[in-house]
Amino acid sequence: MIDRAARLERIRVLLDERRHPERRIGIFSATNLTRLVLRLVLMGVVGGLAQRVLPSGPIGVTLTALAIGAADMAFGRAWARVQGQVQRGFRAGTSVLVVVLLLGTLVALLGPNSGIGRGLRGAGSDFLAEQNARLDRRNRARGIAVDPAQASGADWQLLIADSLLVKGTYREAEAWCRELGPGWGLPGGLGNLPTLSSWPTLERPVSVWAAGRSAIQIGDGQRPSVGSSGGYRDTEVKVVLCVQGGP
C-alpha cells in the first residue's frame, strides 16, 4: 500500500512538472542538495551507531551495510512524501540559511581537514569571537552603582569611577592593582584566599578577577565560597578587587 501511494505521488509530480516546466528540480537545486546532505548525514549516523553496537569482523561489516541500506531506503520513501513541500519552501525563499548550513555540514562530513572545511570553521570561529567581544564591550559599559564608602577597606579596594564599579580584562586588572603601589595585587582564588580584615559588602554579589585568570564572588561581607577556574576570554571583563599582599 505504501509503495502504491509512493508511485502515485511520483506520477503526480512528473505530471505537474510536465504541465509547469519551471517547477522541475535541477540537479544542483537547493532541493536536491538538501536531499543529498540529509541522506549522507543519516547514512553516516546509522553507520556510526552500527559500528559501535555490532561486533567487528565480516559479520559486523555485513550487518552495518544492511543497516545503512535500510536507512537509505527508508529515507527515500520519506523524502518522496515531503519533497513537494521542501521544494515549495525553497521557491518561497524561506530556506536559504538552511541550504548554507546543509552545505557546511556536507563539507565537514566529506572533508573536515580540507581547505574549504578549515575555511568554514575559521569563519565560524571568527564570527563567534566577534560576537563574544561585542558582548564583552557591552558588559564593560554596563555600570554597577556602589556607595564609595563601601568600595574600600583597610587592606582591599574596589576600583570605582563616578560611583560605578570599574570593569576590566584580566590583564588590565593586574596592571591597575600594581599601580596602587608595592604589595598590591589581585586576590588569590578559592584555594588561596588572602586573609583580610573584612570583605566587601555590596547590595548584590559581583564576580571579580582572582589570580591565575580565575574569579571569585564577593559582596555579602563573608569570605568568598563561590568561584570559578581559569579559561576566560582575553576580552572578558569583570569587576576589579585589589588587595594588599596579593599574588
Image: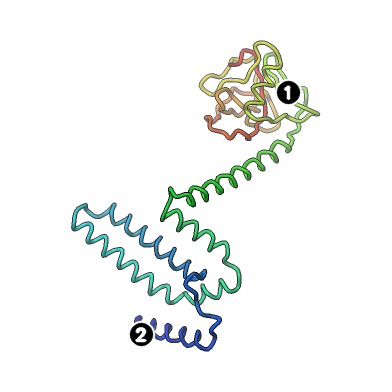
Q: Residue 176, percent across and down?
A: 69, 21
Front residue (pair 124, 178): 124
Front residue (pair 85, 185): 85
Characterize the local packing of mark 2: few (<14), some (14-19) or many (20 or more) Cα atoms within 10 angstroms.
few
Front residue (pair 6, 241): 6
Disc 1 is placed on an element classified as loop
Direction from residue 58 to residue 170 in the image, left or right: right
Residue 4's tag is 2
Residue occupying the point 22% across, 61% down: 62
Residue 92's tag is none
Circle 1 or circle 2, nearest the eye:
2
Residue placed furthest toward the left? 58
Residue placed furthest toward the right? 162
Characterize the local packing of mark 1: few (<14), some (14-19) or many (20 or more) Cα atoms within 10 angstroms.
some
Amino acid residing under circle 2: Arg
Direction from residue 134 to residue 46 in the image, left or right: left
Residue placed furthest toward the top? 182
Q: Is residue 71 above or below residue 167?
A: below
Amino acid residing under circle 1: Ala
- Report the colour scheme: rainbow
Disc 1 designates what residue? 151
Direction from residue 144 to residue 12 in the image, left or right: left
| Quadrant (top left, top right, bottom left, bottom right) of the N terminus | bottom left
Q: Residue 150, percent across and down?
A: 74, 23
- Answer with mark 1 or mark 2, whichever residue precedes in sequence: 2
Q: How far separated are the C-alphas under marks 1 and 2?
A: 78 Å
Q: Is residue 70 above or below residue 160?
A: below
Residue occupying the point 65% across, 31% down: 238
Q: Is residue 1 above or below residue 239?
A: below
Residue occupying the point 51% across, 21% down: 191
Which of the 4 image quadrants contains residue 143? top right
Residue occupying the point 43% across, 66% down: 36
